[in-house]
Structure formats: C-alpha cells, structure tokens
Amino acid sequence: MPTTNQDFDAEALYRALLGQVRAAFAGLPDAAIVGIHSGGAWLAERLAADLDLKGRLGFIDVSFYRDDYARKGLHPDVKPTHIGFNVDGATILLVDDVLYTGRTTRAAINVLFDYGRPACIKLAALADRGGRELPVAPDFVGVTTSLPGHQLLSLTRDGAGQLSLTIEEDNADSAQ
C-alpha cells in the first residue's frame, strides 16, 4: 500500500522484505542473489546471510551500462562487478535499495546477461518510490511511497551494519 510517511524504519522494512523473499525462495534450486552497488549490495549481503546463500552472492555496478553514461560520464565511485557463480539457469534475486525510474534495473539486467542466461530474474527493493520511466516492477518490496521529484530516498549503513532510510533534497543539476 502506498504511503507518504516521512519516517522510515529501514530495519523493519528489511525484515518485511526478508519475509517475502524467504517465502518465495524457500527450496528453490540454483537460487542466487545479486546486489546493485551500493545500497542494493548491502541488502543483498544481509539477505544472502539470512537465507544461507552466501556462496551464491554477487555484486554489480551498472555505471557503464547506464543509458545516461555519455551525458553524465563516469561516476567517481565505481565499484567492481563480481559474480562468482554460474548465471546460466539460475533464479536470480536482483536487489536494489530504491526503485525509481527503472533505468538502473534495466542496466543491471544487461550486466547479468553478459554473464549468462538466467532462468528467471526477480526484483527486490527496500523502497519503491514510483516515477517509473520503464516497465519495471518489484516482485518484493519493503515499502511503496511517493515523493516529489526534488526529493530522493537515501539508504545508509552505519559501522554496525544498521540501515537508515532518509528523505533528502535532490541537489543534482537536472541538466546533467
């Protein structure tokens, strides 16, 4: 159910997301988890630990696959992509922190197909803020909310691994 609540308990949202994924992925052969750097990678690490899939955990950076790469250039904090398992025939849970336009998801799927042909890709997001530009929808989501275009959701992780989800003003130049 959509919400406009300004306060988000990221740990509670994670537990809700975990429950959904656990129910759907219980006993699936060839299940794997791939997190999109960086917030999705943090979530994927926790999901893999909680679901006992640490050996089937991967991380991707979509920087070079973005459709706005030529316009925005290289992000200064590019992380390595690491997928240390066979993607062919796997059921992959693709994890992102916040789902917005769908463009990051599209780029992530392109990365996955460079590694092989999964049997199925399911999408999990801690938060879905709407505003889709591509036909992408999460299979599992902690919260669905609506934000004006000048705001964004930001996931952070402290030294103890605790998650926080906050609303911030988007100060990015819209001309970029």
Image: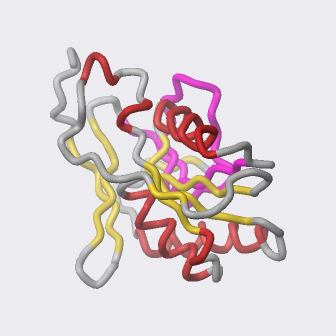
Q: Residue at x 41, y 54 (%)?
A: 5
- Coordinates of residue 175 in the picture (x, y in percent): 21, 15
Judge by depth and name the residue closer to the eye, 124 or 76.
76
Number of numbered discs on residues: 0
- Coordinates of residue 58 in the picture (x, y in percent): 52, 61
Q: Residue at x 80, y 75 (%)?
A: 26
Color scheme of the displayed model: secondary structure
- Coordinates of residue 24 in the picture (x, y in percent): 78, 66
Numbered range of the magenta stretch: 120-147
Whether residue 138 sits left or right of residue 30 in the image: it is left
Judge by depth and name the residue closer to the eye, 127 or 40.
40
- Coordinates of residue 107 in the picture (x, y in percent): 50, 34
Q: Was residue 128 drawn as part of the magenta stretch in this picture?
A: yes
Judge by depth and name the residue closer to the eye, 130 or 139.
139
Looking at the image, is 86 positioned above or below residue 146?
A: below
Looking at the image, is 137 positioned above or below residue 135?
A: below
Whether residue 101 sits left or right of residue 79 in the image: it is right
Looking at the image, is 80 positioned above or below residue 105?
A: below
Judge by depth and name the residue closer to the eye, 22 or 145.
22
Q: Examine the image and state in which quarter residue 70 appears.
A: top left
Q: Examine the image and state in which quarter residue 112 appears.
A: top right
Q: Residue at x 32, y 67 (%)?
A: 164
Q: Was residue 59 drawn as part of the magenta stretch in this picture?
A: no
Instruction: Say which quadrant the C terminus sits in.
Output: top left
Q: Residue at x 24, y 23 (%)?
A: 72
